[in-house]
Amino acid sequence: MKILSIDTASKICSVALLEDEVIVDEMNLDDGKTHSENLMPMVEEILSKNHVALSEIKLISCCTGPGSFTGIRIGVASAKAMAEVNQIPLASVTSLETLARMDDSKKTKAVLIDARNNQVYCGIFDETWSLIQESMADDIAKIMEQLKTYNHLICLGDGAMLHKKLIEQEIPTAEFSAENEQRAGLGGKIAYQKYLKKDLQNADTLVPLYLRKSQAERMKEKQK
């Protein structure tokens, strides 16, 4: 089964083509241009290069966040458009799930994504990549209180790198991943597992995962 996977939730615009769980090809671009400029040309290129028509795609994997509000909107809107026109089912994959998959150890995985202003998005996963508790968006100090309750912790994501010194001070046994950038290929692998479980979406039901309000929304509320 051919899967098209897209991830625009981070600074990297990432597109992958998979055959079931096997990554056939992957493109990752961070050239300073917006995802709105890069995404669809990258989709067209990866399909053309591998001689695959969009009509042959049986599943579209879309990273729904959390992460860049603008990037997430672009990815979700593009995935919904392709799915609706071609009647292709969708799989919603989170940034937290994707980053957790970068570690295959028996350790608890704490995924931290920088949300700016000392805030992070956080997801905590067990050794089978199952979410242990509901994903959070909060100040790093409050997130640290949650992380301290876990043993054998490995931290992943740009938020883990940003707050590495603090984490090392508070949790001396914590380890850190060498890979911390999201990739559409891993998202596609997760999407395939969701397909087998019939955990799918369509153009009407696919929604972004923001975890918190945008900066513009928060500023507007303060002005009231």
Image (tube, rainbow, N blue to C red):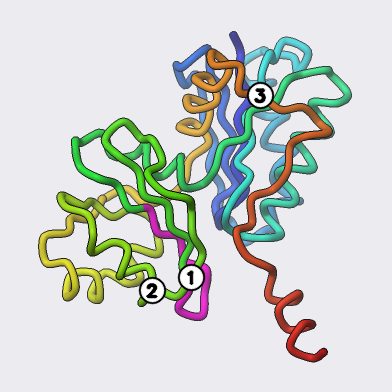
- Count of numbered tags: 3
User: Which of marks 1 and 3 precedes in the sequence?
Assistant: 1
Q: Nearer the viewer, mark 3 or mark 2?
A: 2
Which residue is the extreme one toward the left?
173
Q: Residues within 10 Å of mark 3 (few under 14, many from 20)?
A: some
Q: Secondary structure at mark 3?
A: loop
Q: Give percent across and percent down for residue 218.
A: 71, 78
Q: Secondary structure at mark 1?
A: strand
Q: Which mark is residue 138?
A: 1
In reply to whether residue 163 is colored magenta, the answer given is no
Q: Give percent across and percent down for residue 59.
A: 66, 19
Give left or right: position of 158 versus 2.
left
Mark 2, residue position: 142
Q: Quadrant of residue 32?
A: bottom right
**C-alpha gap between disc 3 and disc 1:** 29 Å
Q: Quadrant of residue 159?
A: bottom left
Say which residue appears at 17% left-offset and 67% top-offset.
171
Q: Give percent across and percent down for residue 33.
A: 67, 58
Residue type highlighted by circle 3: Leu
Assign the C terminus to one quadrant of the image: bottom right
Give left or right: position of 94 versus 85.
left
Mark 3, residue position: 200
Say which residue appears at 77% left-offset and 34% top-offset.
205
**C-alpha gap between disc 3 and disc 2:** 33 Å
In reply to whether residue 114 is colored magenta, the answer given is yes
Q: Which contiguous range is marked in magenta?
A: 111-119
Say which residue appears at 40% left-offset and 61% top-offset.
158
Residue type highlighted by circle 1: Asp
Q: Nearer the viewer, residue 10 or 97?
A: 97
